[in-house]
Image (cartoon, helix red, strand yellow):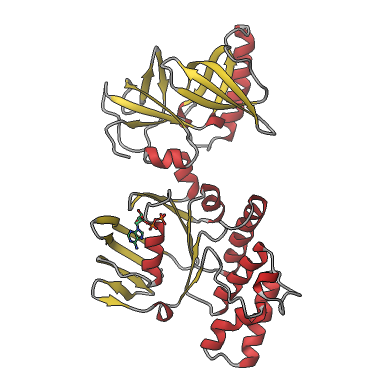
Amino acid sequence: MKPILEVSRLRKAYGSFQALSDVSFSVGRGEIISVLGPSGCGKSTLLQLIAGLQQPDSGEIRLREELVASPSRLVPPEKRGINMVFQDYALWPHLTIYENIAYGLKRQKAAPAERDRKIKELIALLQLNGLEDRLPPQLSGGQQQRTAIARALATEPDVLLLDEPLSNLDMRLRIEMRTEMAYLFRRLGTTVFHVTHDPEEAFAMADRMIVMRNGSIDQLDVPQACYQLPRTRSVASLLGAGNRLSGTSTGTAAAPAVQIGGSVIAGTAPGADLPPNAPADLLFRPEDARWVPAESAAAEAAAALDAWSAAVDSAASPNASPAVYSRLPVQIVHSAFEGSRWRMLALAENGERIAFMHSQPVDPGCSGFLMLQAAHVYLYPQSATS
Ligand code: ADP
């Protein structure tokens, strides 16, 4: 099936600053795409180009195969068959919830009976019953957000653009709403192009995600693939691999490894191969490290590790290669209570700081090892700019 949205070789500069360079991708009908990246990476610029609020310096955008944007062509937003939900919802404050949802349909000159039927359907779908006659300031943040979605869906756009749609909600509501939105859009078969800086929001919503950095795409894949095999250092750290150690590559292309102090740590190189004997970075997530205290009896430590390895291996995908574990010596410096677990701070042999999760606090000064599974240790050449 032909893509509904095609973006090819898009570039946009503000003065001498290149905000987008050579961005290309396509979106299938009914697909939810989340664009994720740190502030300033060009997400909003990309969204505005698709919406028709900006014109590209080079490249093209096609919607339903029709050219809507190029340096010589700019189809205005209202003629693109798209709708946008803004970060601050942009509801009309003097119009009721019903009138807000009706706004686009009135402009489309839909017949009054048909209009009323659609609005009532959306009000039910977005659980806004009983709020029809209220003004936006009389609604909670979550209700305003649902009204903005209802208004955007009313005209049945080919593509719905969402700009950080949950950033004004508190954390509990954000978690609830991102799942609700994903469920709603999948049921309706809506094509969604969604921009966020929150990885969990992208994971919860996306069929595929685009991870951006400095105006370019670092990785475009299904969320699980981006999470399990982050192609660049910056994708890995954006997706939770907050521990970063610098060492020297020692392994082979088939079995990459990095030497940190006196320890060789086996890992995975999801991006470029590591040149031999060259500076390399090792990244892993705090939740992927298992603490084994040095003073515990060897048998006890081995049993704890065996139990953990078995649990980790059984959770891994069936076609994963046999698990390889490495030991990284560390010394504890601090424990912080986080509810269900403790976040521990420790120092590696080379003096770099590491965080990991543990079921109980450990006294500062204790020495031990972090057990790391190669599949969850990401290795990148230091020469790579990302
Ligand atoms: P994001 O949405 O990922 O935070 P933006 O697309 O808003 O990123 O911005 C990308 C870069 O372009 C940023 O460095 C920003 O400061 C710059 N930028 C955005 N809009 C303008 C503008 N109108 N004029 C000049 N620079 C801009």
Residue 16 is left or right of residue 338, and the answer is left
Task: Report the residue at 54% width, 35% height from top.
Answer: 316
- 245 vs 297: above or below: below
- 314 vs 226: above or below: above
Image quadrant of residue 92?
bottom right
Q: How many marks?
A: 0
- 318 vs 246: above or below: below
The answer to whether residue 257 is visible is yes
The one of 309 and 262 positioned closer to us in this rendering:
262
The one of 275 and 45 positioned closer to us in this rendering:
45
The one of 64 and 242 positioned closer to us in this rendering:
242
Task: Report the residue at 37% width, 56% height from top.
Answer: 42
Report x, y in % for residue 99. 63, 82
Task: Report the residue at 46% width, 55% height from top.
Answer: 208
Report x, y in % for residue 6. 35, 66
Name the residue furthest right: 130
Task: Report the residue at 38% width, 71% height from top.
Answer: 53
Residue 266 is left or right of residue 57, and the answer is right
Report x, y in % for residue 303. 63, 15
Where the N terminus falls, by quadrant?
A: bottom left
Where the C terminus falls, by quadrant?
A: top left
Report x, y in % for residue 166. 57, 58
The answer to whether residue 327 is visible is no
Image quadrant of residue 132?
bottom right
The one of 9 and 170 positioned closer to us in this rendering:
170
- Point out the quarter of the image occupied by ligand 1: bottom left
